Image (cartoon, rainbow, N blue to C red):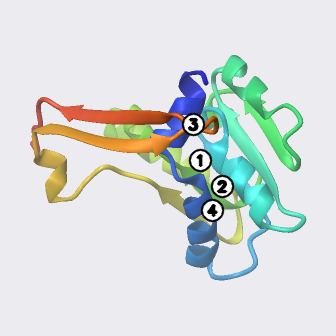
Amino acid sequence: MDKHDLYELCAQSPERDAPLLAAIHGGDPQIFGEDFSGAGATSRAWTSLIPGGSAFAVDHDPVVLERLAGAPGVTPRARDVMDADDPCDILFVGNFSICELHTRADLVAYFRHALRRLRSGGIIACDLYGGTDAYTLGTLEDDHEAPDGSKITYTWEQRHADPT
């Protein structure tokens, strides 16, 4: 397993996120957009969940997008998310990736751009880190089973939190 496999196993939940996003949409969404997609785990889960569904996985790193080669219904786009132009019913920004936009101006520009990509009735959903636990310092360990049956312990450590 490489770092991307480990991240998907321990930190992502694409098999839960895809049906949740479809339910939040509430209609009959077919086209999924995943900005800051990394290896496109949620895009892959989407096309497995939705018969005839398609997905566009957008990331600036073409190497990580190579993992999507042969993924049915998923089109990788190696580019800046601000250059993405594929229309979609759901535009998803997962794993706190929206926090890569550090200024208000960049965030506003991104959301304006994202809105133009949505088809009629489309939604934008962002996975954010928050709640009262976001300010709790310490370590959390979570065990996962690898595909070969071995045990992997995922450790999340938060050393500092500044709510201001």
Q: Which residue is under mark 1?
A: 113
Which x, y percent locates residue 151?
A: 46, 36
Viewer-proximal residue among 136 and 82: 136
Residue 107 seen in the current view = yes
Q: What residue is drawn where x is 13% and y is 29%?
A: 159
- Tell me the kind of residue under disc 1: His
Instruction: Count the numbered circles shown.
Output: 4
- The local secondary structure at tag 3 comes to loop
In this picture, residue 72 sits left or right of residue 12: right
Amino acid type, label 4: Ala
The outermost residue toward the bottom is 26
**Residue linked to disc 4:** 18
Q: Would residue 89 be found to the left or right of residue 108 on screen?
A: right
Between marks 1 and 3 in the image, the one whose residue lies nearer the viewer: 3
In this rendering, the label closer to the viewer, 4 or 1 = 4
Mark 1 surroundings within 10 Å by alpha-carbon count, few (fewer than 14), some (14 through 19), many (20 or more):
some
First along the sequence among labels 1 and 3:
3
Q: Tell me the CA gap for discs 4 and 3.
A: 16 Å
Q: Nearer the viewer, residue 135 or 148?
A: 148
Task: Tell whether label 1 touches label 4 (CB within 8 Å).
Answer: no
In 3D space, how far apart are the residues under numbered discs 4 and 1 (Cα atoms)? 23 Å
Looking at the rendered structure, the kind of residue marked 2 is Arg
Q: Which residue is denoted by mark 2 in the rendering?
A: 116
Which badge, 2 or 3, is on the more N-terminal residue? Answer: 3
Q: Earlier in the sequence, mark 4 or mark 3?
A: 4
> Whole-Å distance between the Cαs marked 2 and 3?
17 Å
